[in-house]
């Protein structure tokens, strides 16, 4: 006779596998759909480049198109992945928290797009301009398509995920894993890590560092505020019960 706990574990693993497969299928379909329009996306992203981007081999074109389509695929897949995660943990959530945590799903998509926009419209042109000034008249500037878009993705996609901080904190507070006291105690360490991230990906000048550090610090403070609101509501519900 099988152990009921073992059966439960196997059931959870099977459910997790099925939800991961659904998420993966969504990503593949979304990436394939984006690939149909990838040339239009490419021309829009490269609209400010004064020269035609260079390719060094026949595979470079496909690699660039796949990178662009992949980022679009990630953006489309995120809300589906968040929904699959919510469905997986929903049985463990209190009845009151089930509906409220649904806010987590649209928030994930919105914050990712805001982070991407911050990276693309603010950080990327700032860093690219700095690099071009560094080159000055000493170097002939010629961008390869692969290097240009790899650089762009490095300057945008990480911020899409970093801007998820408030939504993730809200969700983890709902689950009881985080609370505002823990976040406040970890503030110094969090600031240090965020500052290191900002300094690592920005040009070596104080203005660029500040432009990136300040929004990241604000995100952390917003996350603490959200955690406080969620935590108070949970305590109030427990008191009412």
Image: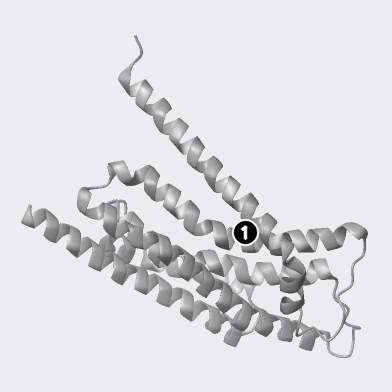
Residue placed furthest toward the bottom: 137
Left or right placement of residue 75 versus residue 237 in this view: right
Q: Is residue 30 above or below residue 215?
A: above
Q: Is residue 25 visible?
A: yes
Residue visible at 49% across and 52% down in the picture: 81
Residue visible at 86% across and 83% down in the picture: 51
Give the percent coordinates (x, y) of residue 64.
Answer: 78, 63
Pointer 1 residue: 73
Q: How many marks?
A: 1
In the rendered view, how is the structure colored?
one colour
Q: The N terminus lies in which quarter of the figure? A: top left
Residue visible at 42% across and 26% down in the picture: 10
Q: Secondary structure at mark 1?
A: helix
The foreground one among 197 and 8 is 8
Give the percent coordinates (x, y) of residue 83.
Answer: 43, 52
The foreground one among 120 and 194 is 120
Residue visible at 33% across and 63% down in the picture: 183
The foreground one among 76 and 116 is 76
Give the percent coordinates (x, y) of residue 6.
Answer: 37, 21
Left or right placement of residue 72 versus residue 225 in this view: right
Tell me the quarter of the picture where residue 133 sits. Answer: bottom right
Q: Is residue 189 visible?
A: no
Q: Is residue 112 above or below residue 98?
A: below
Tell me the quarter of the picture where residue 165 sits. Answer: bottom left
Give the percent coordinates (x, y) of residue 59.
Answer: 88, 57
């Amino acid at each position: 006779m099988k152990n009921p706990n073992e059966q439960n574990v196997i059931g959870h693993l099977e459910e997790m596998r099925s939800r991961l497969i659904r998420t993966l299928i969504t990503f593949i379909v979304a990436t394939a759909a984006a690939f149909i329009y990838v040339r239009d996306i490419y021309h829009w992203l490269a609209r400010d480049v004064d020269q035609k981007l260079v390719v060094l081999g026949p595979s470079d074109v496909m690699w660039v198109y796949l990178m662009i389509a992949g980022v679009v695929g990630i953006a489309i897949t995120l809300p589906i992945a968040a929904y699959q995660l919510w469905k997986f943990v929903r049985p463990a959530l209190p009845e009151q928290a089930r509906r409220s945590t649904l806010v987590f799903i649209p928030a994930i998509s919105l914050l990712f797009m805001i982070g991407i926009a911050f990276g693309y419209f603010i950080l990327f042109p700032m860093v690219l301009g700095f690099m071009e000034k560094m080159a000055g008249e000493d170097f002939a500037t010629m961008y390869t398509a692969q290097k240009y878009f790899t650089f762009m993705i490095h300057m945008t996609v990480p911020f899409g995920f970093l801007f998820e901080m408030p939504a993730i904190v809200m969700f983890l507070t709902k689950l009881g894993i985080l609370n505002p006291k823990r976040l406040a105690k970890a503030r110094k360490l969090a600031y240090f890590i965020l500052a290191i991230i900002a300094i690592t990906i920005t040009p070596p000048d104080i203005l660029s560092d500040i432009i990136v550090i300040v929004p990241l610090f604000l995100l952390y403070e917003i996350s603490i505020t959200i955690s406080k609101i969620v935590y108070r509501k949970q305590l109030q519900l427990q008191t009412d019960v």
